[in-house]
């Protein structure tokens, strides 16, 4: 499996999903990595891909985990914030989950289904930042 699977269909997804109403800044992909063989401490599921999105001084590092049909996204948010939430959304606008970012910047979003997803970072006293769409 190549490291590009997570962005497979990304151009079509971006064309199909209207982002004009989001009202957020767009964090763009800055790095993509392939599967790992070791197990991460944040989850027992193997890492199948790594992604990184950036906007100005914020970087969102993601690890995509898979076990059968269940997906988990774990990672770290780097940037200046006292309090932050991360929201997972689907193309139809359905909000999958909202998690708090720990003081270390770490987070885990478990029990996701396969398919297109984007994440919106909501920080105190700062405009929201949304990742580009990616495929779980």
Image (cartoon, rainbow, N blue to C red):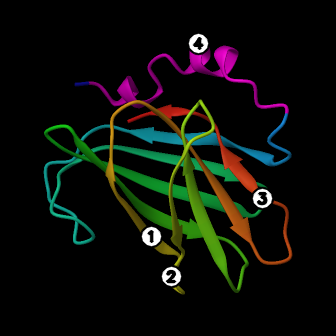
Give the x, y percent position of residue 60.
57, 58
Left or right for 58, reference 85: right
Q: How far is disc 1 from disc 2 in space, using C-alphas?
A: 6 Å
Whether the residues at callouts 1 and 2 have beta carbons within 8 Å, the answer is yes
Left or right of 1? Residue 88 is right
Q: Is residue 112 magenta?
A: no
Q: Earlier in the sequence, mark 4 or mark 1?
A: 4
User: Which mark, by number, is residue 102?
Assistant: 2
The one of 70 and 107 positioned closer to us in this rendering: 70
Label 4: which residue? 12
- Which mark is first along the chain, 4 or 2? 4
Q: Secondary structure at mark 1?
A: strand
Tell me which numbered mark, 1 or 2, is placed earlier along the sequence.
2
Image quadrant holding the C terminus, namely top left
Residue 87, x across and y down, in percent: 58, 57
Could you tell me if the residues under marks 2 and 3 are in contact, i.e. CB atoms within 8 Å?
no
Whole-number angstrom distance, CA of label 2 to CA of label 4: 34 Å
Please identify the dominant SS of the magenta region.
Answer: helix
Q: Earlier in the sequence, mark 3 or mark 4?
A: 4
- SS at badge 3: loop
For image coordinates 65% across by 15% down, the residue present is: 16
Gap in Å between the C-alphas at discs 4 and 1? 28 Å
Q: Which residue bears the numbered disc 1?
A: 107
Query: Do residues under tags 3 and 4 come within 8 Å of each other at their CB atoms?
Result: no
Q: Earlier in the sequence, mark 2 or mark 3?
A: 2
Q: Secondary structure at mark 4?
A: helix
Residue drawn at x 49%, y 16% as measured from the top left: 9
Q: CA distance from mark 1 to mark 3?
A: 17 Å
Over which residues does the magenta segment extend? 2-20
Residue position for label 3: 128
């Amino acid at each position: 499996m190549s490291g590009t699977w997570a962005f497979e269909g990304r151009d079509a997804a971006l064309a199909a999903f209207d982002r004009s109403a989001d009202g957020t800044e767009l964090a763009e992909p800055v790095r993509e990595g392939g599967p790992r063989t070791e197990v991460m401490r944040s989850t027992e599921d193997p890492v199948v891909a790594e992604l990184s999105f950036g906007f100005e001084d914020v970087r969102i590092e993601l690890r995509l985990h898979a076990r059968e049909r269940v997906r988990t996204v774990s990672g770290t948010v780097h940037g200046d914030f006292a309090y932050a939430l991360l929201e997972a959304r689907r193309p139809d606008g359905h909000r999958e989950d909202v998690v708090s970012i720990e003081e270390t910047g770490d987070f885990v979003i478990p029990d996701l289904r396969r398919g297109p997803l984007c994440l919106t970072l909501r920080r105190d006293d700062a405009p929201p930042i949304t990742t580009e769409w990616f495929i779980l």
